[in-house]
Image: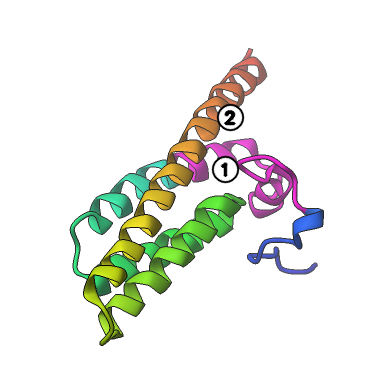
Amino acid sequence: MTAPRLVPPPEGDRQATVIDENHLGRMTLGDRRLEREVLELFLRQTTIMLNRVVGAEPPLAAAAAHTLKGSARGIGAWRVARAAELLEQAANGVAGKNGRADDAAHGLAEATAELRAASLEASAAIGARLTTLLAELGRERS
């Protein structure tokens, strides 16, 4: 048995969906209850990490983005993972940069906005997925 991939597949192999359901299925071993639990945890964690990023010093923003990047990769939320990675890089660049502060701050603000947009998109997709999962799990009990 091989370990599940945490790195997104090449662009050509990736589904054009917000959440890569094949990847999510592999990571949850096809267990629908586990999938539901993981998605619910991701939603909560996304809210917490985004709140930490807003107005945070760059090192804290980078740490929160790093956490979110790993979680997003775990469920196949590739856009969120990419946005979190960009924010992490931007925050690390601000923390270690001696260049123009306003340029660095602008880059950090843009990366934060992209992470918010990607997270909102993922949250909507997860909400729809959870609705479907709950209906399926409810039918299994009947």
Q: Residue at x 25, y 87 (%)?
A: 98
Q: Is residue 62 magenta?
A: no
Question: For this rendering, which residue is in front, 5 or 95?
Answer: 95
Q: CA distance from mark 2 to mark 1?
A: 13 Å
- Please determine whether, in this image, residue 54 is positioned above or below residue 19: below
- The residues colored magenta run 14-40
Q: Is residue 31 magenta?
A: yes
Q: Sequence order check: which comes first, mark 2 or mark 1? A: 1
- Please determine whether, in this image, residue 139 is positioned above or below residue 8: above
Image position, residue 137 (x, y; %)? 61, 24
Residue farthest top in this picture? 142
- The scheme the figure's colours follow is rainbow
Quarter of the image with the N terminus in it: bottom right
Q: Amino acid at mark 1?
A: Leu
Classify 10 Å Cα crowding around label 2: few (below 14), some (14-19), many (20 and above).
some
Secondary structure type for disc 2: helix
- Please determine whether, in this image, residue 114 is positioned above or below residue 92: above
Image position, residue 14 (x, y; %)? 75, 52
Image position, residue 24 (x, y; %)? 65, 48
Kindly indicate the quadrant of the structure image that contains residue 64. Answer: bottom left
Residue that badge 1 annotates:
34
Q: Amino acid at mark 2?
A: Arg
Image position, residue 23 (x, y; %)? 70, 51
- Between marks 2 and 1 in the image, the one whose residue lies nearer the viewer: 2
Kindly indicate the quadrant of the structure image that contains residue 3. Answer: bottom right
Image disc number at residue 129: 2
Q: Residue at x 54, y 22 (%)?
A: 131
Q: Residue at x 59, y 18 (%)?
A: 135
Quarter of the image with the C terminus in it: top right
